[in-house]
Amino acid sequence: MIIIGERLNSSRRSVQEALARRDDAFLLKEAKLQEGAGADYIDLNASALLDKEVEVLRWAIPLLQRILKIPLSLDTANPEVMEEALKLHRGRALLNSLTGEEKRIQSFLPLLRNYQPQVILLCLDDQGLPDKPERALSIAHKMVERLVKQGLKAEDIFVDPLVRPIGADCRAGLLFFESLERIKSHLPGIKTIAGLSNVSFGLPQRKLLNRTMLVLALEAGLDAAICDPLDEELQAALAASSALLGLDPSLKKYLQHIRQKARKEKP
């Protein structure tokens, strides 16, 4: 399981305020905690800063890359901001994210050709959100085919079938799992990804829903998750389910998790 740490998102008030005041210590602490907890990428979103977004990224990206050993997931819907972020990023970044909407594809294609980042594709096009697994697969297939023709490798593409709140539609989880299974079986080589916390939006006990979503999605073939790596119960669920599903053959990760937990609990 590839983990993209979600905590540096300006939709969180504390993060927005820290970005606005250029708080080096806050940013570095949040990033290092996530890296230490096993994140493979750190998602960075400054979009709530609006016209200050580029200015904030010019400060934040070099700062983070001075201390992190892992790459960033650059999270913006603005192609001009994304280009500036890709220029700033040392090494290969993860572009978060691209939809199947034609106007957006046209604005992002030059960035994919010029910078060759890894990329997250959302199953969303000009007709809106898919209401059936077959349409999610159709959107994903068209987008993957188009990007491969632009020179991207299938293994550098993450497809997101889109997790939606079950509070708005009780079948949203089922739609995601069925879409995920179809995409995995019909698009070999690509990775799948999910923004876990979307499923619990507006509901109590959000972490319970998020980690249960992760376990079920892992069984359905999920490769990566945008989530909070500091959620210890989520990490425990991931370690146990990976072991039970045969995804941790030597049980190395499971035993490592148990040892780390024991060290933390030791007086």
Image (cartoon, rainbow, N blue to C red):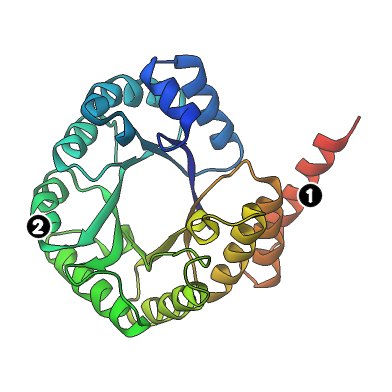
Three-letter amino acid code of the residue under disc 1 = Ile
Q: x, y percentage for residue 256?
A: 73, 48
Find numbered disc 1 in the image and state the secondary structure of the residue it sits on: helix
Q: Residue at x 41, y 28 (%)?
A: 16
Quadrant in the picture for residue 252: bottom right
**218 to the left or right of 264:** left
Which class describes the residues within 10 Å of circle 2: few (<14), some (14-19), or many (20+)? few
**Up-down: is 14 above or below 262?**
above
Marking on residue 99: none
Q: x, y percentage for residue 244?
A: 70, 71
**231 to the left or right of 6:** right
**Up-down: is 113 above or below 263?**
below
**Up-down: is 216 above or below 257?**
below
Q: x, y percentage for residue 223?
A: 47, 63
Q: Tell me the mark number nearer the camera, choosing from 2 and 1.
A: 2
Q: Which residue is drawn at 61% across and 39% down?
A: 37
128, 226: nearer the viewer: 128
Three-letter amino acid code of the residue under disc 2 = Lys
Distance of label 2 from label 1 (alpha carbons): 48 Å
Q: Confirm or deny contact between disc 2 and disc 1 (CB under 8 A).
A: no
Residue identifier under label 1: 258
**Up-down: is 190 above or below 267?**
below
Residue identifier under label 2: 103
